[in-house]
Amino acid sequence: MSYDNTCKYLAEKYPGDFARWLLASDTSDIQVLKTELNLEPIRADSVTFLQIANQILHLEFQTTPKSKTPLDFRMLDYYTRLKREYWCDIEQVLIFLQPTSSEIVFNTQYVDKKTRHEYRVIRLWEEDPTPLLANPALLPLATLARTDSPADLLTQVAVNVDMIEETDERQNISACVQVLAGLRFDKSLITQLFREEIMQESVIYQDILQKGEERGKKQEALQLILRLLTRRVSAIEPEIEQQIRTLPITQLEDLAEALLDFSNQSDLVNYLGNISLTQPNQED
């Protein structure tokens, strides 16, 4: 998910640059919209909505075509929700980061009997790197662009990063470059071209580090709770265990307290059922 989060950070930090790249729009009057849409709430870290004049640019970044809900239907779903809430023109761009032969990355529409919905698809590995290299905000994406010599391309990206004058911006762009370059290049080449201390000082690196620490804490909490539940309600069905593993750390902490009152597995099932009624849907 760090790859998707990195792209989301770039799109929200530099919305004008993404609008100029994808819409040929030169306006600076751009608002980053919330990523939760009403009705049944849906969220996805890789989704960015940019409101430009009377238009919304919806960006969806995908490392792989795998998704719990089919991507073509998700694009339709987002479109109808955005249209209902803002009632303006909507341009949707689905950007795939990593090469794949999956048919999904070549699909540009959702079709179901009399329903047809179209959207744009960008496969970064087919994109000309020239416009991406020319814009500091898009340099991280340039690492994944079309080239006959990937090492030379990464070297050019590193040179362009070093030319960024403002220190904080250079550190953050460098960190984003290194994260996305990890999808294509060996770590040894990345560390050879980029100074590690610059990445460590960047806000995006700190965010990734924090998420890593949170995952470690969650794993510890999961192990303890599963042991306690096994002693409290005996063996846990695999489906129930999987549901527990998807809970965020705050809900795991609540479960750790609630399980003290459980006397059988039905209590656990009922508790998890109540959580699912109030928990927003998550998309990969």
Image (cartoon, helix red, strand yellow):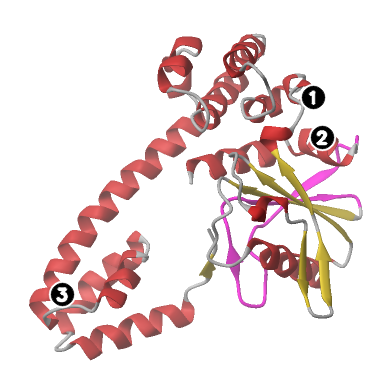
SS under mark 2: helix
Give, as a three-letter code, the residue at label 3: Leu
As drawn, is 206 to the left or to the right of 72? left
Q: Residues within 10 Å of mark 3 (few under 14, many from 20)?
A: many
What residue is at 65 percent from the left and 12 percent from the top?
Answer: 156
What residue is at 68 percent from the left and 28 percent from the top?
Answer: 145
Q: Residues within 10 Å of mark 1 (few under 14, many from 20)?
A: few
What residue is at 75 percent from the left and 39 percent from the top?
Answer: 15
In the rendered image, the vertical position of residue 259 relative to residue 163, given as above or below: below
Horizontal and vertical percent position of residue 56: 82, 54
Give, as a three-letter code, the residue at label 2: Trp
Give, as a three-letter code, the residue at label 1: Pro
Q: Which numbered tag is attached to residue 21? A: 2
Instruction: Choose between 167 and 195: the one closer to the eye.
Output: 195
Q: Disc 1 to disc 3, how far (Cα)?
A: 55 Å
Q: Disc 1 to disc 2, how far (Cα)?
A: 8 Å
Q: Disc 2 to disc 3, how far (Cα)?
A: 52 Å
SS under mark 3: helix
Q: Which numbered tag is attached to residue 26? A: none
- Closer to the N terminus: mark 1 or mark 3? 1
Q: Which residues are magenta?
A: 26-53
In the rendered image, the vertical position of residue 53 relative to residue 280, given as above or below: above
| Magenta stretch: includes residue 154 | no
Q: Which numbered tag is attached to residue 229? A: 3
- Closer to the N terminus: mark 2 or mark 3? 2
The residue beneath circle 1 is: 131
- Figure label count: 3
